Structures are given as structure tokens and as C-alpha cells.
Amino acid sequence: MNSPLNALLVVVLALNLFALGTSRLVTVIKIVSLQGVLLGLMPLMIEEHVEWESLLAMGGTILLKGAVIPWMMMRAIREVEIRREMEPLIGFLPSMLLGALATGLALLFSKSLPLASEHTAPLLVPASLATIFVGFILLTTRAKAITQVMGYLVLENGIYIFGLLLLGVIPLMVELGVLLDLFVAIFIICIMVNHINQAFSSLDTRRLSELKE
Amino acid sequence: MNMFIHLVLMLAMPPLLLGVINKTKALFAGRKGPPLLQSYYDLIKLARKSVVISRTTTWIFIAAPVVTLTSIAMAGLLVPLGPFGAPVSFTGDLILFAYLLAVGRFFTTAAALDTGSSFEGMGAAREVTFACLSEPILFFALLVLARISGSLALGDLLHAPLDAGGQGDIASLVLVAIGLFILLLAENSRIPVDDPNTHLELTMIHEVMVLDHSGPLLGLILYGASIKLFVIGAVLLHVLFPFQSGSALLDWGVFVAEMLGVAVAVGVVESTMARLQMRHVPYLLIAAILFCAFGFVLLVR
């Protein structure tokens, strides 16, 4: 039962590294949305008998992370007309290596965590730690507001993986609430990105600290 | 009997793969494309042409295509096709396999340097630089398979995915499959790494090294390159689609179909992706090394 889940999780880890290594925003958006779809499929592999409630949550996750959010992000970058992340604080190759290091350490350290025995065999915990860390790297080292949003999404994906440990315990309402929060956050950010672009004629967050009339 | 089919497939099928790749690319571009057997016609045409050899070259220039072809063909003998055994198999032959590939590369680059052309020297330098990164991919991948199977002979090691299915195994095999596919593209100078169609010396890797070869010698190089695609494709298939039905005929049929499938996949990648900038190629290769290394970490942790 765990093997297909682990296979999906390592694909998620691989996507993390590709997200760190590429400079094209469109590619990053595609990678993160693919990651979201894969995460949405995971409950199918964990639960033995799937109920309609979890199917609803799954469908919501896949629809939101795989279609709605990417669509909003694509729209946002089309309107502000940026294609690439030009000057990251840490280069693409070093940040990829950093992400790889984080993944390796997460794999090694998660073994020494005091986990319930049914949680040690699947890679859920290391994958979630690694994804959260990659999200942090994207958030902190990229200068463009859009890429930081992608970092936020990757971070959220990592937390979602961790949440899979509690599958079946979290009520449907909470899961849907989390999805709604995510949707609203991204929605507002996309509007803000537009406004930042109009006010500063750039999405470089380093310039936001300059005072302007 | 199986050994005979192995030899026939390995020697006769590779140019067809190039044809399938080109046909796939043509379909994507909305063209009709060259016939599937075009590579065979090309090889026959080249075999009948005369050779022009530069006066600055030495015997290495003539020996290189022969040595490259032979070493690749020998490497092909070590790799089992589908669920069948390899014609030659002994403990530790994975090292021989890696170094047979390296010998072929060494002679190709030596011949490129032998011409004294600066363009070919550049191509040779690039080929060797990227080889530094692509060899660890192969070794890590084989290491993972050796760990799963507990054997150091390619014949047994590559059959490990057939009877795998333990806890961490499938996860590592997925990672190794991604790594090997990137290796396939890099080693055969396919698109994200190198463009086999381009004839702009400044951006080529493999094609630029063989600019001075002509006639039958060029034919040998093209044929050797296609066998390399076949051999590395066979290694990848073991990880990607381990399949055994029990009936020999069906297994061979499935193997041939899978191989053509790999060629189609390469064609799809070539049609949908742009070539990477030369300085970005190492990122891709390092990512592939990391995937295979993770696969190993997953197994030993």
C-alpha cells in the first residue's frame, strides 16, 4: 500500500528541485500545479475505503491547486509582463543544491523522530519537511513577488503532506476551510501584485523598502 | 536462440529508433517527415562514398570510429534485453560497461582533437565536461540496482526491478528512472542537452566532433551512436517497465514495442522542449545525479 504513495512522494521531491532550478516563471507555476495535483491524489492511496467526504476534499484540492490557482497566476504574470526571475539572492544551481541537501537531511533525520509506528515507513514526514524547506528557500531567496507566492504555495504543499498523516481525523469542514483560506490568499496576492506593479513599475520586492510619494 | 535474437536486435534495430524519433518530431511539426527507414538508407549511402582524410590527421582519426562502434557493441552484449539474460555476464561487469562507454567517448574526442580544428576541440572539451557529470548518474543508478538485487553482474542487477516491490524500492526506482532518462538524453546528445540536427559549430557537442569524418567513417559513427541509444534505452527499460510474461515470443514483442515507445518519448521531449543554454546543461545533469543519489539514500537509510 505504501509503495505507490512513496513513488508519488519522490516525484513531488523531484519537482521541488526542478522548481528551484528553473528561472522561467511559467515553468515554476506548472511544476507547482502538478505538485498540487499529485498531492490531491495521495489520499486515495492512504485510505482503504474512500468516502464521499474525502472525495469532495480531494476534488477541491485538485481543482484549486491544479487549475484555479495556476490560472490566476498565469493571468497575473501576463498582466505584469514578466517571464523570468532575474536576480535571485542565491543562484539557481546553489539553491538547487541547498534544496537537495535539505531533502537528504530530512530523509536522514526523520528516522530519529519519535513517530507513531505506522508513520515511519512512508516518506510522508521527510517529504513534508523537505518541501517546507524548499518553500522557505523560494520565499527568501527570490526577489520577484510572484516567485515568492510560488514559494508560499510550495510551503503550503509541504504542510498539506504533513496533514496527510492526520487523514481521517481532520473534519471535512477544516480541510475545506484551509482550501478557502489558500484561495483567498492567492486571490488577494494576485490583485496586490498588480497594484505593486502599477505603483513601483517593478515586482522586485527589494524596491518596496524605498519610500515613494 | 535468445542470444541470437539479442544480437540481431542490437545490430539491426538501432537505426530504426532514429527513424521513429524523426517521424515523431515530424508529426509534431505537422510535416510528413522522412521515411522510417531513412537512417538505413543514409548508412548505405555513406558506406558507398569515398573518404576524404585531412593530411594533419594520424591513425587515431581512422581508428576512432571503429573503436567507438566496437566498444558500444561490446557494451551492448553486457546488457540484458527485456527479461532475457545477457550474452556475456560476470560479477563486476557494470564497471566494464561504464568504461566501454568511456573508451568510445575517449576515442571520439581524441579523433576530434586529432583534426587540429578549433571547433572540434571545443566540441571535445564540452563532451568530456558533460561526461564528468553524466558518468556519476550511471554509477549511482547501477549502485541503487546493485543494492536492491545484491548482485554486481549487470545481467542480474538490471533484472532487480522485475522482482522488486519492497517498501522503499519503488520510490528509489522512480528516482533512478528519472535519472536514467536524463542520462539517455545527455549521452545520446538529444535535445535538452544537444541538438542532433543543428549544424552551427558554436553550439554543438557531439555533431561538432565528427565534422571532419566522411563516407564510411561517418557511417560507422552514426551507426555507433544509434547503438548507444539502443543500449542505454535497454538499461532504462529495465527500470521503467519491468515485464515478464513467460512466453519468449511475447516478451521479445513487448521489448521491441517498449523500445519504440522510448524512441517516441525522446521524440516528444525533443518536440516540446527547447534546448537548454550550454551553461544550464550542468544543472540538469546535477539534478539527475541528485535523483539517483536520493534513490540510494532512500535504500540505505
Image (tube, helix red, strand yellow):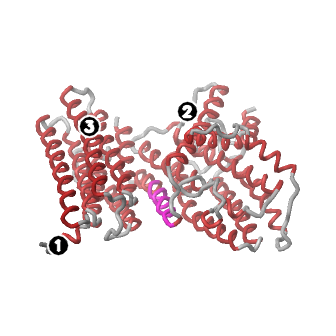
Q: Is residue B2 left or right of residue A203?
A: right
Residue B243's mark? 2
Residue assigned mark 1: A209
Q: What residue type is labelled 2?
A: Phe
User: Where's residue B267, x and y in %?
Assistant: 57, 43
Q: How far apart are marks 1 and 3 (CA)?
A: 36 Å
Amino acid marked by disc 3: Leu
Whether tag 2 and tag 1 are in contact, CB under 8 A, the answer is no
Q: Nearer the viewer, residue B138 or A145?
A: A145
Q: Is residue B286 visible?
A: yes
In magenta, the rendered stretch is B279-291
Q: In which quarter of the image is residue A139?
A: bottom left
What residue is drawn where x is 38% and y is 62%? A96
Whether B28 is among the magenta residues is no
Q: Which chain carries label 2?
A: B
Tell me whether the residue at label 1 lies in contact with that at label 3, contact meaning CB atoms closer than 8 angstroms: no
| Main secondary structure along the magenta-highlighted residues | helix
